Image (cartoon, coloured by chain):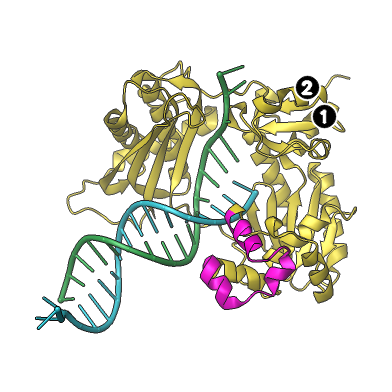
Chain colours: A yellow, B green, C cyan
Amino acid sequence: MIALVDCNNFYVSCERLFDPTLIGRPTVVLSNNDGCIVARSEEVKSLGIQMGKPVFQIQSELRKHKVAIRSSNYTLYADMSRRVMKTLGRFSPEVENYSIDEAFLNLDGISDLAEHCHRMREEVIRWTGIPVSVGIAPSKTLAKVANKHAKHTGDGVLSLADKGDQAKALRRTSIHDLWGVGRRYARMLMKNGFKHALDLREADDKWVLKRMTIVGLKMVHELRGIPCIELTLKPPPKKSLIKSCSFGRTLSALGDLEEAVSVYASGVAERLRQQDSLARTITVFLMTNRFQTEHPHYATSATMSFLSSTDDTSVFVQHGLVLLRQIFRRDQRYLKAGVILDAIESRGREQLGLFDPKHESSARLMQAMDGVNQQFGANTIRVGSCGDRQEWKMKRRLLSRRFTTRWDELLHVQT
DNA sequence: TCTGGGGTCCTAGGACCC
DNA sequence: TCTGGGGTCCTAGGACCC
């Protein structure tokens, strides 16, 4: 049996931990640049405010209901996630950290599943303060369904171990809410007469394979209780890494874009080294505001490959800037840029070039740089072209403190 | 004025090889 | 008019996830 543990309204729950005045009050957390709503408290959900809605479109509604608003504080959420996952580890030897707020657990061999999961739920809230819901089923897809219904059962735990319960739950699950069915497939399925998950469970294999590829077929089998999607206990290294971000305002000056590309290239290079990998391809892209209608949307990119793979920040920055200058046009107002690393290989298994020099000194420099930045804070040492003004940085006007990861941002308590 | 960021997998089709 | 068979690799595009 598999359990899916999902943190309830995770970002909002994290904010409430350190600001109890938010408890019971409608609260939302915004995306980067304070653009869209990416997390909602139950109160906000029942107001009918939708996920992903741009804030400026519903400003008056938020004000009317006195909704509390926070910028997203990923440093805090990532640390709280780590604590939740650690607690879950006490309840199963096999935990897949599926996303920042979800984990799949292997519960094979556990006799009283519901009781076990209730204890787990209580322990997570006692140790971390984060409320979670638990869905239990023989496959991941069914565990997802179970979890969805568990949110409304009252005690937060629902088991679909039983065939009859599975059918009942699938009858009450819209095709739109299935894990593996996005907007496109939902529309296609509705057109073909599939309304509920139960309809899809009974679908013809050949038809599903043809219309939804092998991925869809696996999902249908999972609905029948045949596990097809394994637990991934150790996350494999990323095959591509992206660092991209919208600016706080549009940019036209090459100098500003050079700073941004330098910062993004440095950031993505650091993540590459963290997973002990090397990359052989770098892409830089630029785009204007895609929602603005006065000017046509303009997006452009350029890619280059190195003779041999590297993890050297200065190499990525240097070539990133070359690519930037190739695609930069003076007459555009850019809102977003990014750097992508591709053709990633694990260190020690990389394809060597015929004429490569060995870059020993570079490896030691990167090690020293990462060491200093880890100890004294990000960007303590950086490449000069990152600049020190960085006036293009994103907006985060309503940011809470990094309560659990920074000594200088600890919560103050007065007695 | 204001609209997120970061990934994965599958398939079809083209280029290329012998 | 008629023009082989069998295969690999790469990429773009489309779908999905949180």
Pinpoint residue A167: horizontal percent, then vertical percent: 80, 71
Does A246 sit left or right of A342 as displayed? right
From the image, state whether disc 1 or disc 2 is nearer to you: 2
Question: A191 or A219, which is in the foreground?
Answer: A191
Q: Is residue A93 visible?
A: no
Pinpoint residue A51: horizontal percent, then vertical percent: 69, 40
Instruction: Give residue A146's quadrant in the image.
Output: bottom right
- The correct choice, above or below, for B14 with respect to A109 in the image is above
Check disc 2 and report its element: helix, strand or loop.
helix
Q: Quadrant of the N terminus of chain A?
A: bottom right
Pinpoint residue A185: horizontal percent, then vertical percent: 59, 59
Q: Is residue A363 visible?
A: yes
Residue found 66% across the figure and 71% down from its top: A222
In contact (CB < 8 Å): disc 1 and disc 2: no
Pinpoint residue A398: horizontal percent, then vertical percent: 68, 22
**Parent chain of label 1:** A
Query: Residue A202 magenta-drawn?
Result: yes
Identify the main secondary structure in magenta.
helix
Disc 1: which residue: A22
Residue found 41% across the figure and 22% down from its top: A333
Does A390 sit left or right of A320 as displayed? right
Instruction: Give residue A228's quadrant in the image.
Output: bottom right
**Parent chain of label 2:** A
Residue type at mark 2: give it.
Answer: Arg
Q: Quadrant of the C terminus of chain A?
A: top right
Disc 2: which residue: A63
Residue type at mark 1: give it.
Answer: Leu
Q: Which residues are magenta?
A: A184-213
Tell me, for residue A279, which label it has, or none.
Answer: none
Near mark 2 (Cα within 10 A), the count class, few <14, some 14-19 or many ≥20, is few
Q: What is the tally of numbered marks visible in this picture? A: 2
Question: A144 or A371, which is in the foreground?
Answer: A144
